[in-house]
Amino acid sequence: MSAIEVVLIRHAESEANVAGRWQGQGDAALSAHGLIQAEKLRARLTGARFDRIVASDLGRAAATARALAGLDREIELDPLWREMDLGAWEGLTRAEVAERFPDQLEAMRLGLPVRIGGGETYPALCERVERALARVLETTPPTARRIAVVTHGGVITSLVGLLLGARVRRGRAFGPVANTSMTVLRQDEGGALHLSLYNDAAHIGPLGDWAATRLAEGIGVVALIAAASTGAAGLSSWCGRLDAVYTEDGRDVDGIAAAVGCAAARAFPAKDLAAMISHAVASHPGARVGVVASATAIHALGTSAIETARGPDAPEARARLGEARAGAVAHVLWREGRAVLADYNVAPHLKS
């Protein structure tokens, strides 16, 4: 079996996204900003080879796929990749849902299989998107290596959580995905699945919407930078300014600090990544700070976050978190001593 990459891409911003309304399986056109996002995605992926481009048949996903494919590529539309059916929630704001469907919201909080708005349950969504992924993998020719799937935020986060067993009541390991972000599942030659990239929207900005909003609310965000022999080369092309940079042993901390426009560069005496993050967050509340650590330590932290979110009674995971890439960045929010991954393995400055 050949190794296959499935690049999951969330559609560009829609008019309903702008209005803060639930869309589900209804539809809304791309917003003016969404059209710009789709063009930025296309520009970033110019020259990238996709053997197939599959998309949800809902208009916002199909329009994003067409921007990616251009006029000379066939797009395969598949309703299995549609967003969750939200029934009567369709078109409502979060406040309106809270007012009209408080019992359903409480059932969701408790992890009960409620039919949201009379539409789908979460287990039904997971079963559907698992079939969608299986169909893509089973119908891809042996010579193909890379497939783009343009779909929806709820589909991507649900599929990742399903495969890693990480969606349970006690917390989650991942934040939601941004419009036009890329999340990559890799099936190796032995058939095992790995999450090698999560929520990469670096063509839009250094942070996805969720992490950027938390930062604006005064919640600190940590950029975990996997140490590399090339140091900070290329980081400044997309990473943006960090308010401080810490490293476990002083390794190229000055070069990284200079690359991200930061005057505060500090070595940390302990080689414990959790301790470094806790110290950085406490020392710079509400800021975006960098922590340089080994790729092994960053991968271990991400794996631990997933295991914590899974809990002792979770089903066996069907995918693993891929190894962290030297030179890549993973943004995390630090909550009560544990990490929530906003993104993972983002490295547009490195060659594929």
Image (cartoon, rainbow, N blue to C red):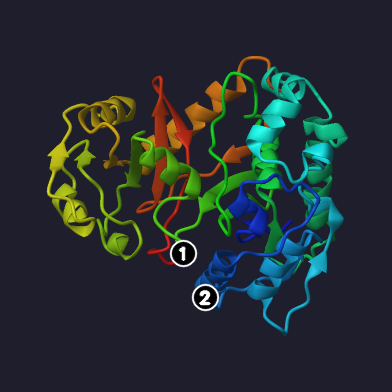
Q: How many marks?
A: 2
What amino acid type is highlighted by mark number 2? Ala
Q: Are marks 2 and 1 in contact (CB under 8 Å)?
A: yes
The residue wearing badge 1 is 203
What amino acid type is highlighted by mark number 1? His
Element class at badge 1? loop
Report whether 183 appears left or right of 133. left
Crowd tier of the residue under label 1, counting other residues whose Cα lies within 10 Å: few below 14, some 14–19, many 20 or above: some
The answer to which of 276 and 181 lies nearer the viewer is 181
Q: Which mark is residue 43?
A: 2
Residue at horizontal 64 percent and vertical 36 percent from the top: 94
Residue at horizontal 59 percent and vertical 45 percent from the top: 195
Report whether 156 appears left or right of 79. left
Q: Name the residue at the top extreme.
A: 312
Q: Which mark is residue 167?
A: none
Residue at horizontal 49 percent and vertical 43 percent from the top: 210
Residue at horizontal 64 percent and vertical 72 percent from the top: 68
Element class at badge 2? helix
The answer to which of 272 and 80 lies nearer the viewer is 80
Q: Position of residue 262 (x, y in %)?
A: 17, 51
Residue 349 visible to an observer of this rendering: yes
Measured in 3D between alpha carbons, the distance from the residue under mark 2 to the one under mark 1, in whole angstroms, is: 9 Å
327 over 147 or under it: above or below: above
Residue 318 visible to an observer of this rendering: no
Q: Position of residue 234 (x, y in %)?
A: 30, 64
Report whether 119 appears left or right of 294. right
The answer to which of 42 and 106 lies nearer the viewer is 106
